Amino acid sequence: MTHRIAVIPGDGIGQEVTPAAVEVLDALDIEFDFVEGDAGDATKAETGEALPQDTRELARGADATLFGAAGETAADVILPLREVVGSFANVRPAVSYPGLDAVQPDTDLVFIRENTEGVYSGIESEIADGVTTLTRVITEDASRDIAEFGFEYAETNGYDDVTIAHKANVMRETDGLFLETAEAVAEERGAEYDTALMDALAMHLITHPEDYGVVICPNLAGDMLSDLAAGLVGGLGLLPSANVGSENALFEPVHGSAPDIAGEGVANPTAMILSAAMMLDHLGYGEDGDRVRDATEAVLDAGPRTPDLGGDASTEDVTAAIIERL
Amino acid sequence: MTHRIAVIPGDGIGQEVTPAAVEVLDALDIEFDFVEGDAGDATKAETGEALPQDTRELARGADATLFGAAGETAADVILPLREVVGSFANVRPAVSYPGLDAVQPDTDLVFIRENTEGVYSGIESEIADGVTTLTRVITEDASRDIAEFGFEYAETNGYDDVTIAHKANVMRETDGLFLETAEAVAEERGAEYDTALMDALAMHLITHPEDYGVVICPNLAGDMLSDLAAGLVGGLGLLPSANVGSENALFEPVHGSAPDIAGEGVANPTAMILSAAMMLDHLGYGEDGDRVRDATEAVLDAGPRTPDLGGDASTEDVTAAIIERL
Ligand SMILES: CC(C)[C@H](C(=O)O)[C@@H](O)C(=O)O
Ligand SMILES: CC(C)[C@H](C(=O)O)[C@@H](O)C(=O)O
């Protein structure tokens, strides 16, 4: 069976790390049909749209999508793409690797970020001159879906600690519903869990990341906390993510298009290649996913390394080294 | 002239660190009239209200208020108290001290947090079964006030780097207005500044805190980012804060009531004493504020230290040592 993969490199280093991930996938014994789509700043400049209709169709119809990064138009690309693939869960692992200079070398976290609501509702208006409002939406259904996904993920992946992040002391109705629903899911499953106010959690994750495992979060809290965790493990160049839907899914590095280094061929392909590994898991090739992760970790440990990790290797050097170790 | 200071110890370690700060203030040559008010969990259990009317009046009528901490009722105490004193700006310095085991020893940050709106509007409802909403409010007036305060603070206190934090790529109208207004203030003042998406900022603050100084933030972003900074400098036990209003102000440690160690007499009084130092600045006793800060820093460096900093001293030991060095 051939898997149809939509490949959307986007802008900046997206154009460099996405082909690197495709090369790694090509080196496996799996048949993929890669179909490329356009999106991002350059596409908008050309066509007037950051995410043209045919790229949406491509992602909708594919078994999975690999997305690189977009520049100024990032929100116009990634938010609708998440919707197109029906993604309700954003999975963001943040692991520190031995040998790399991490702020906290004992970090092994996975953020399970709600991917459809919260302040991402898009419902905003200027209700009077100089007065604007945004409607933050939290539903029981979406809270239940993300909590079930999170506890299931923890169980499948051997994480003992599950934390439900919230700010229900201030957002009493909305985060109150999120918290209450997630707690009900935990009770139903007989699962152990903790709850944490997201501000206090931000502090504890920095001082004691080893106390945490899976963190189930509302949308924006997950956005911030996962970037915070990127800071702990040594930067955005390492963090992959999966936007999981009920049928379809999209995989992307947590980093952006990095215009400062784009075009130089030195972007760190790790986050993108690890995103491809998450795609392999999702498509049912968990063993191949492990092979890619093992090879990538070995290269992170022994080198070659790109400049963001203190090395002077190119994207291509790192990719070739990973392929060699597969 | 005698200054009337409302003292609201609250719950847990609030009952221990607040008297410590009062002791330090008493050791200075300034005439204070300290009047104590009740608030918090214990007060609610007794009177049915976490923040009784006469405590509100006390804070409203005082020249300044010192607040310790509250337990479960924290939001019911601190949010109305901030309103009572007309506070629009929450000032949260996070500085790492030499000799302490900080995650990032080069941290010298001040968060200037908008203190009246954002998701703290209190406008929430269940609009249908299992569907809740919260109205996030951002106004031009409040954004202008906090930006002016922030740039003024940076200038007065010698900070070169000012960063405006936002998430205007997603919250286009609301954070768009915040960002645009803050940028307009900077232009009017001819001040240098940077802007940063708050997720990316969370990461960069962890890896490179030395690149930042004053950070002007919407309400919830300031809540999370300042707790994050607490993680960088070694914990909440060190962080003071000022809730500044146009006439009146309230000073409180960033930490909570710490029920796990309450009653043992080992709470770290540093955050509360440094909050009292911020009060001294506010009342026009900047030199005394500096004396308190210098004495506190000397004790942080040389000891005695409470258990949260690896020592075995009591609250009273640390307080006495600070007073001795004044
Ligand atoms: C680009 C932006 C809309 C996006 C988000 O906020 O989700 C990004 O920060 C991310 O985390 O993928
Ligand atoms: C207790 C809570 C309402 C409060 C806040 O969110 O402002 C606290 O976290 C703080 O930062 O002072």
Image (cartoon, coloured by chain):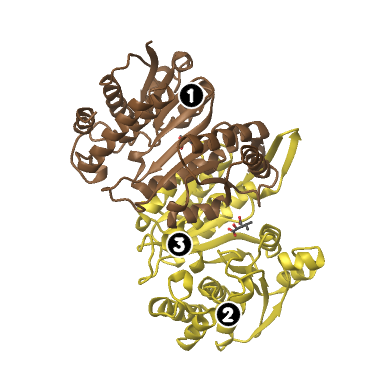
Chain colours: A brown, B yellow
Q: CA distance from mark 3 to mark 1?
A: 41 Å
Mark 3 closeness class: few <14, some 14–19, many ≥20 residues within 10 Å: many
Q: Residue B8: x, y in percent?
A: 68, 72
Chain for numbered disc 1 = A
Say if A128 sits above or below B81 in the image.
Answer: above
Q: Earlier in the sequence, mark 3 or mark 2?
A: 2
* Residue at (29, 47) in percent of width and height: A98
Q: Which residue is mark 3?
A: B154
Q: Is mark 1 within 8 Å of ligand 1?
A: no
Mark 1 closeness class: few <14, some 14–19, many ≥20 residues within 10 Å: many
- Secondary element under disc 1, as helix, strand or loop, is helix
Specify the farthest residue to the front: A190
Q: Which residue is mark 1?
A: A81
Badge 2 amino acid: Ala
Relative horizontal placement of residue A210, taking residue B88 as reference (left or right): left
* Residue at (48, 83) in percent of width and height: B322
Please tell me if label 2 and label 1 are on a single chain. Answer: no
Name the quadrant of the N terminus of chain B: bottom right
Badge 1 amino acid: Leu
Q: Which residue is mark 2?
A: B20
